[in-house]
Image: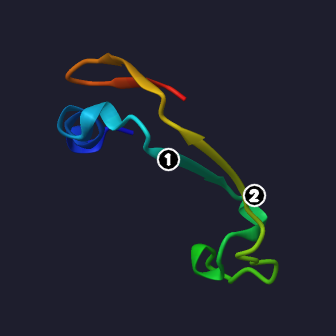
Amino acid sequence: SNLFGLVTGMAEDLQSLVGATVVRRRVYARFLDAVNFVAGNPEADPEQELSDRWVVEQMSQLTAMTASFVL
């Protein structure tokens, strides 16, 4: 997401974010915290996540709306 131009602004100010680490965390809905459900969630488990990590090698495109990177 590039909400409020955050990513494009950082890319312009911080050497195209080369060397930055990108982390994606995925969680199945059944393991989300109980606060996300009206009746709570007995299966909530903060340890049940899948994480992927990448390092930005270069910025391949930058526009006012988007930034694309080679990971």
- Between residue 16 and residue 34, name the one nearer to us: 16
Q: Is residue 25 above or below residue 19?
A: below
- State the mark number for residue 70: none
Which scheme is used to colour this image of the protein? rainbow
Circle 2 is placed at which residue position?
Answer: 28
Q: CA distance from mark 1 to mark 2?
A: 23 Å
**Label 1 SS:** strand
Residue 24 in picture, x, y percent from top left? 59, 48
- The residue positioned 68% from the left and 83% from the top of the image is 40
Mark 1 is surrounded, within 10 Å at the Cα level, by few (under 14), some (14 to 19) or many (20 or more) other residues, namely few
Point out the tag, 1 or 2, that comes first from the N-terminus.
1
Residue 34 in picture, x, y percent from top left? 65, 81
Residue 37 in picture, x, y percent from top left? 63, 75
Q: How many marks?
A: 2
- Between residue 44 and residue 37, name the one nearer to us: 44
- Quarter of the view holding residue 19: top left
- The residue positioned 56% from the left and 50% from the top of the image is 23
Q: Is residue 16 above or below residue 40?
A: above
Q: Amino acid at mark 2?
A: Tyr
Circle 1 is placed at which residue position?
Answer: 21
Q: Amino acid at mark 1?
A: Thr
Locate the N terminus by quadrant: top left
Residue 11 in picture, x, y percent from top left? 27, 34
